[in-house]
Amino acid sequence: MLAELHKSTPEEAREHRAIFGQWLKVLREAEGLSQRELADRLSLDYYTFISQLENGRGKIPAHRYAEWAIALGQEPKNFVKTLLKYYEPLTYQILFDDADAG
């Protein structure tokens, strides 16, 4: 099994973050929120942080995952699982690929 694990290259990591950014934007828009409104919901000083995330730059701080999930109308466990898939694909693969195959 370990031989099948694939470590992401920096280019793949950027691609994962870009896809995550698109997903985040879809969630935000589904809630009917502008970037500024989401920033207000999360008590962020700068809404541009959301723009950066949606453009594949940066990461949501781990200690704020649940807040982001709730602000975006998501169940926290599934939200974090999806974050892990994009932020740490190798960890995600180790934890969940066997479970998904069954």
Image (cartoon, helix red, strand yellow):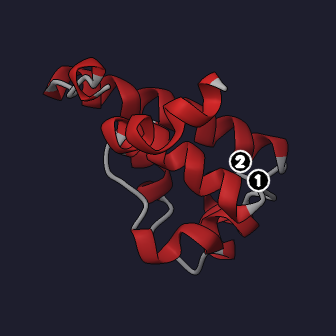
- Where residue 64 appears, as percent x and y from the top left, is 51, 74
Residue 68 versus residue 88 in the image, above or below = below
Q: Is residue 69 visible?
A: yes
Q: Is 27 on the left-hand or right-hand side of 24?
A: right
Residues at badges 1 and 2 in contact (C-beta under 8 Å)?
yes
- Characterize the local packing of mark 2: few (<14), some (14-19) or many (20 or more) Cα atoms within 10 angstroms: many
Q: Which residue is mark 2?
A: 28
Residue 40 lies, with reference to residue 28, above or below; the image says below
User: Nearer the observer, disc 1 or disc 2?
Assistant: 2
Which element is circle 1 on? loop
Residue bearing the label numbered 1 = 33
Q: Identify the residue at horizontal 20%, vertical 28% (top origin).
A: 7
Q: Amino acid at mark 1?
A: Leu
Residue 80 percent location from the top left of the image: 57, 56
* Amino acid carrying mark 2 in the image: Arg
SS type, badge 2: helix
Which disc number belongs to residue 7? none
Query: Earlier along the polypeptide chain: callout 1 or callout 2?
Result: 2
Q: Tell me, yes or no, if residue 45 can be seen here.
A: no
Q: Does residue 39 appear to the left or right of 2 in the view shown?
A: right
Q: Position of residue 92 (x, y in %)?
A: 43, 41
